[in-house]
Image (cartoon, rainbow, N blue to C red):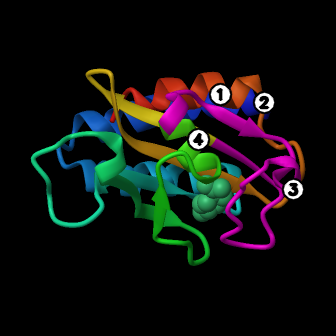
């Protein structure tokens, strides 16, 4: 089965899971499990954009941070600032970031020394990034255009 075939069968399942549940944490938990078990990634999960401390009336990105959400895989760092690491970069630049070799990404945050390549996809609601989907692989160059396109479709179901 090709990677494209796997996504073809996974996307309708992901859509059904998201349509039958309104709670974002529950949806993120099942989407992480679905991706992780389908592809056997090293780490699959979400970081949510959340207030860095107590909620402030100001609503700019500097008051917020990425906080660890539902995931599958080994323990991970819990907070990532705006613009930091692959996740913070995808949040700041509001675009998917594909990293074929994490050692060549300046500022990569190594939650696990096993991780060799990574993809981070922003999750947007009404033009605002509310979370990122982060996937790590133990092999170099795991993620490509097929992953980017299919994962961008998937996060729109959330
Ligand atoms: N490598 C990420 C940090 C999160 S872990 O991979 C789970 C980054 O550079 O943002």
Q: Quadrant of ligand 1?
A: bottom right
Q: CA distance from mark 4 to mark 2?
A: 18 Å
How crowded pointer 4 is (Cα within 10 Å; few <14, some 14-19, many 20+) is rated as many
Q: Position of residue 63 (x, y in %)?
A: 29, 52
**Residue numbers of the magenta segment:** 92-119
Query: What secondary structure is found at the residue carrying circle 4?
Result: helix
The answer to whether 27 appears left or right of 154 in the picture is left
- The label nearer to you, 3 versus 1, is 3
- Looking at marks 3 and 2 on the same chain, the residue that comes earlier in the sequence is marked by 3
Q: Secondary structure at mark 1?
A: helix
> Residue tagged by mark 4?
89
Q: Quadrant of the N terminus?
A: top right
Q: Which mark is residue 148?
A: 1
State if disc 2 and disc 1 touch (CB < 8 Å).
yes
Tag shown at residue 144: 2
Evaluate if marks 4 and 1 touch, with contact meaning CB atoms under 8 Å apart.
no
Q: How many marks?
A: 4
The answer for how far apart the CA atoms under marks 3 and 4 are is 16 Å
**133 inside magenta stretch:** no
Q: CA distance from mark 4 to mark 1?
A: 16 Å
On residue 103, the disc is 3
Q: Is residue 8 visible?
A: no
Label 4 C-beta lies within 8 Å of the nearest ligand 1 atom = yes
**Discs 4/2, front:** 4
Cα gap from disc 1 to disc 2, whole angstroms: 6 Å
- Horizontal side of residue 67 vs 25, given as left or right: right
Identify the mark nearer the N-term, 4 or 2.
4
Dot 1, how many residues are within 10 Å of its Cα: few (below 14), some (14-19), or many (20+)? some
Residue at image point 25% right, 33% down: 19
């Amino acid at each position: 089965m090709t990677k494209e075939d796997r996504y073809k069968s996974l996307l309708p399942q992901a859509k059904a899971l998201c349509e039958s549940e309104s709670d974002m944490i529950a949806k993120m938990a099942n989407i992480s499990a679905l991706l992780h078990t389908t592809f056997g990634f090293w780490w699959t999960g979400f970081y949510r954009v959340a207030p860095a401390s107590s909620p402030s009336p100001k609503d700019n990105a500097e008051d917020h941070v990425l906080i660890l959400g539902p995931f599958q895989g080994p323990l991970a760092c819990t907070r990532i600032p705006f613009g930091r690491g692959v996740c913070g970069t995808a949040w700041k630049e509001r675009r998917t970031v594909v990293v074929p070799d994490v050692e060549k990404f300046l500022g990569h945050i190594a939650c696990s020394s096993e991780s060799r390549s990574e993809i981070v996809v922003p999750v947007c609601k009404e033009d605002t990034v509310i979370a990122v989907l982060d996937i790590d692989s133990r092999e170099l160059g795991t993620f490509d255009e097929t992953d980017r396109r299919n994962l961008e479709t998937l996060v729109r179901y959330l």
